[in-house]
């Protein structure tokens, strides 16, 4: 599966085209469709922060995915998110997508918008792992296994 080419702005107001503008060789993309999904996204953040420290070729991004809307409504939503996120690094990692959600979901085989969906994606757009929902030990271990399969090396091996 290929991650579809989409563009959005991060909360630092930088235009980003996915997947080619991703900062690392491998990236975990967390797609959220509903405001209440933030709690599910947040369940992954401590683990992903730890993984980014251990794997120098890995990064992650939050992708709030919203239907297409006019500039004014986008600006209001983005400014609201920006106001709630003081961290520059988190703002860099939050890329809002205002897109045709149905088409996007079909390309990624996401059946509906009831949960978050995570994808391990190469900069070339290859989807190497996928998961949904809040973090669990089993899900986090499956991501570590996927990283090992693609040959990523840990710098802080325990």
Image (tube, rainbow, N blue to C red):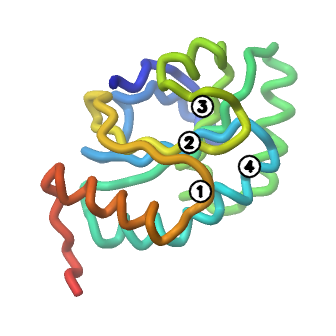
Name the residue: 71% across, 32% down. Answer: 113
Residues at marks 1 and 3 touching, judged by CB atoms closer than 8 Å: no
Q: Secondary structure at mark 1?
A: helix
Q: Badge 2: how crowded within 10 Å, few (<14), some, or many (20+)?
A: many
Q: Secondary structure at mark 4?
A: helix
Quadrant, the C terminus: bottom left
**Residue of label 3:** 9
Which residue is nearer to you in this view: 116 or 4?
Answer: 116
Q: Badge 3: how crowded within 10 Å, few (<14), some, or many (20+)?
A: some
Of tags 4 and 3, which is closer to the observer? 4
Cα distance in 3D space between marks 4 and 3: 20 Å
Residue 79, horizontal then vertical, whole percent: 80, 40
Which sits earlier in the primary sequence, circle 4 or circle 1?
Answer: 4
Residue 61, horizontal then vertical, whole percent: 51, 47
Name the residue: 36% across, 59% down. Answer: 142
Of tags 2 and 3, which is closer to the observer? 2
Which sits earlier in the primary sequence, circle 2 or circle 1?
Answer: 1
Left or right: 97 with respect to 51?
A: right
Name the residue: 65% across, 42% down. Answer: 11
Residue 106, horizontal then vertical, whole percent: 54, 17
- Label drawn at residue 37: 4
Where, by quadrant of the figure, is residue 65 drawn? top right
Which sits earlier in the primary sequence, circle 1 or circle 3?
Answer: 3
Where, by quadrant of the figure, is residue 32 drawn? top right
**Residue of label 2:** 117
Q: Secondary structure at mark 3?
A: strand
Cα distance in 3D space between marks 4 and 2: 10 Å
Q: Badge 1: how crowded within 10 Å, few (<14), some, or many (20+)?
A: some
Which sits earlier in the primary sequence, circle 4 or circle 2?
Answer: 4
């Amino acid at each position: 599966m290929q991650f579809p080419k989409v563009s959005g702005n991060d909360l630092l107001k930088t235009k980003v085209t996915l997947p080619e503008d991703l900062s690392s060789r491998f990236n975990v993309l967390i797609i959220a469709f509903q405001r209440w999904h933030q709690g599910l996204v947040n369940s992954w953040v401590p683990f992903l922060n730890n993984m980014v420290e251990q794997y120098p070729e890995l990064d992650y991004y939050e992708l709030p995915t919203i239907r297409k809307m006019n500039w004014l409504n986008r600006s209001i939503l983005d400014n609201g998110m920006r106001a709630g996120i003081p961290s520059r690094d988190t703002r860099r990692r939050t890329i809002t997508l205002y897109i045709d959600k149905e088409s996007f979901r079909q390309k990624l085989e996401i059946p509906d918008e009831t949960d978050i969906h995570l994808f391990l994606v190469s900069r070339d757009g290859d989807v190497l792992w996928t998961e949904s929902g809040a973090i669990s030990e089993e899900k986090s271990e499956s991501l570590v296994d996927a990283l090992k399969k693609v040959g990523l090396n840990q710098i802080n091996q325990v």
